[in-house]
Amino acid sequence: MPLLKPGDAFPTLAVARVGGGSFTIPSVFDGGYGVVLFYRGSWCPYCNAQLRAFQRATDSLREVRTKVVALSVDDEATSADVVAKHGLSFPIGHSADAMAVSALTGAFVDPGRGFLQSTGFVLDPAGRVVVSVYSSGAIGRLVPEDVVGLIRYLRQHSSSD
């Protein structure tokens, strides 16, 4: 799968949710802006910092009417620990099939351990990619301040908002 670029439709991706049930990207965003984060795992300090940063930015993201979801290959118990540890209020997916997610989105997979590398997408209300950030290693990822600024700009310059 080639990398998703601006204007591409984000593929339909069903994700098992911590706490039960599931969510489907991009419909989970209810026709609003959305942020999709693939994180390497509970063991990754950079991923933990990113998840905490997006949680701290909840109010700013709400102001620009933007929802966040995240997922990893971690099992449900490990993912639930991440949610509890960081007080995450946005949906967290678990037990993702790294190769299937990669085939749909172009996300890089660690060849040795089989986890998804950090990948982030900002989606517009139609479910199209506005920005994609692919990392092939530990660093390089979306930060909430940039996302909020971008969406604020897009909303100010959109005729439909």
Image (tube, rainbow, N blue to C red):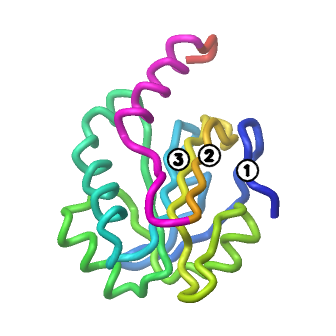
Going by the image, does 41 lie left or right of 130? left
Residue type, mark 2 in image: Ser
Please state, as top left, top right, bottom left or bottom right, where the C terminus lies in the image: top right
Discs 2, 1 touching: Cβ within 8 Å? yes
Could you say which is closer to the camera, residue 145 or residue 61? 145
Q: Which residue is mark 3?
A: 29
Residue 147, numbered circle: none
Q: Which residue is mark 1?
A: 4
Gap between marks 2 and 1 measured at Cα? 7 Å
Occupied quadrant, residue 43: bottom left
- Helix or strand or loop: what does disc 2 sit on? strand
Q: Is residue 148 magenta?
A: yes
Residue at position x 34%, y 78% from top? Answer: 79
Residue 44, image x, y percentages: 35, 72
Residue 127, image x, y percentages: 66, 43
Q: How many marks?
A: 3
Neighbour tally class for label 3: few under 14, some 14-19, many 20 plus, Cα within 10 Å: many
Q: Which residue is mark 2?
A: 132
Going by the image, does 108 lie left or right of 86? right
Gap between marks 3 and 1 measured at Cα? 18 Å
